[in-house]
Image (cartoon, rainbow, N blue to C red):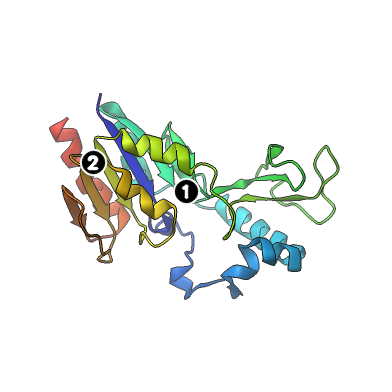
Amino acid sequence: MKRVVVLSGAGISAESGIKTFRDAGGLWEEHDIMEVASYEGWKKNPELVIRFYNARRKQLFEVEPNKAHLDLVKLEKKYHVDIVTQNVDDLHERAGSTHILHLHGELKKVRSTLDEKLIYELSKENCEIQIGDTCEKGSQLRPHIVWFGESVPMIAEAVKLTELCDIFIVIGTSLNVYPAASLLNYTPYNAQKYIIDPHDTPVFGVKNLKKIMTKATEGVAIVVEELLKSA
């Protein structure tokens, strides 16, 4: 069975109603990105960071996977599909995809500031944390998010998957955020590559690359139909 690796970004979630940084001009709910998505911002104002992610988490429970998420599930009928996502939502999981690697963390989870292995999942009924909420070791809980400047622990696994793929699909990402953007460089030389994004993402020196300049729901449908026919 051929292997497909999908690298998904904010563009696929945007069609479910989740705002992106770029759509807001680098702001998230009027907050500068570094105020709410960096360790420095956390140390400066943890109350703001917690409040911000509480609101994002609450919104996530109100949105649903869109057609692009659902169409990717269809590929699993004839391919082994690994989804490597830059997104912190769980829309791929809810759509039914079975192999998902989150590069930048997961919004529905929080973790200990003392022991990063202590991770807890929140529910719709209990989707907020506050200053003073602690792990079993007594340390403050923080969002389970990889902030700017922090290491991306899952990137090595993502590279391994990419090096083994027969088909690589980029969906809804500008390929400007590293190290995720570097994955395209690890694809096998002869692998078929697709980029689905309304903007013309500049890519140089990549063989077998097909650009589909449209939104995720339209582009994924085109690629999935093509791959299922050729399987």
Could you tell me the amino acid type at mark 2?
A: Val
Q: Position of residue 191 (x, y in %)?
A: 21, 39
Marks 2 and 1, how far apart in space?
20 Å
Could you tell me the amino acid type at mark 1?
A: Glu
Q: Which residue does the numbered mark 1 point to in the structure image?
A: 64
Q: Which mark is residue 162?
A: none
**Residue at screen point 56% across, 52% down:** 60
- Element under label 2? helix
Q: Nearer the viewer, mark 2 or mark 1?
A: 2
Nearest the eye: 92 or 203: 203
Q: Is residue 210 visible?
A: yes
Label 1 crowd bin: few (<14), some (14–19), many (20+), radius 10 Å: some
Question: Reading the chain from its start, which is encountered first: label 2 or label 1?
Answer: 1
Q: Is residue 103 above or below residue 164?
A: below
Nearest the eye: 73 or 134: 134
In which quadrant will I find the C terminus?
Answer: top left
Q: Is residue 17 above or below residue 1?
A: below
Q: Which residue does the numbered mark 2 point to in the structure image?
A: 224
**Residue at screen point 23% across, 41% down:** 224
Q: Position of residue 86 (x, y in %)?
A: 46, 51
Q: Position of residue 122 (x, y in %)?
A: 68, 42
**Residue at screen point 37% across, 44% down:** 69
